[in-house]
Amino acid sequence: EIVLTQSPGTLSLSPGERATLSCRASQIISNNYLAWYQQKPGQAPRLLIDDASRRATGIPDRFSGSGSGTDFTLTISRLEPEDFAVYYCQQCATSPLTFGGGTKVEIK
Amino acid sequence: EVQLVESGGGLVQPGGSLRLSCVGSGFTFSSYWMTWVRQAPGKGPEWLANIKQDGSEENYVDSVRGRFTITRDNAKNSVFLQMNSVRAEDTAVYYCASGRYWTSDSWGQGTLVTVSS
């Protein structure tokens, strides 16, 4: 199975700052079928980005995804208070689908 | 508005069985892959299984293959997860999700399954 490693584990930033989250795969993800989700406490994950770089419906343009092959990045250009949460990447190319371990973005 | 509502969770003894249900509304259910994902307390999500629009294809993670079965009833806009031979490590919140392909575009609120004697 494809193992996804997210880094850093925790990102401590202030509102207005830029967040850069990394997701590295143990093998090439075909067609860049890589998704990013946001999860807040007590809530289900919410899809932010699919196909590595396509924003889901209703997602603000401060969220962007990039990367290909085995290295992917989620960037939040300017953190809003509601963006402090845990972010997960997921490869959707090969069964079993797998999630990364998550990056927590916390208020500094 | 897409809505997914899970039910059927609860307390079950090790070795027992449970059937989870998820009803979808606000979208053309029969046009979407359906997926089950679980999340143990304090852990990240774990993808469990998905099923194709017409039910002709199912995929499972190894940890549940042979114990859990995903099915769907498009006439009732429902997807199910039959859980057999449950173990303590199956304790988690179970989410159903929908997607045009394998990405989980929309999620339910989850149902808690606790495996304990």
Image (cartoon, rainbow, N blue to C red):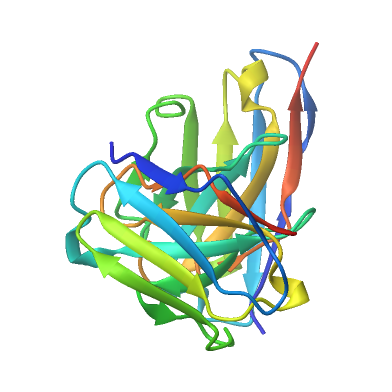
The answer to whether any part of residue A51 appears in the image is no
Q: Residue at x 56, y 51 (%)?
A: A103
Quadrant for the C terminus of chain A in the image: bottom right
Residue A48 drawn above or below residue B95: below
Q: Residue at x 37, y 44 (%)?
A: A4
Asked whether, in this view, residue B32 is left or right of residue B20, the answer is left
Asked whether, in this view, residue B19 is left or right of residue B56, the answer is right
Residue B68 position in % (x across, y down): 50, 32
Closer to the camera, A59 or B95?
A59
Residue B43 drawn above or below residue A89: above
Residue A80 position in % (x across, y down): 71, 78
The answer to whether any part of residue B81 appears in the image is yes
Residue B93 position in % (x across, y down): 70, 42
Quadrant for the N terminus of chain A in the image: top left
Residue A42 drawn above or below residue B64: below
Asked whether, in this view, residue B18 is left or right of residue A87, the answer is right
Q: Residue at x 37, y 28 (%)?
A: B62
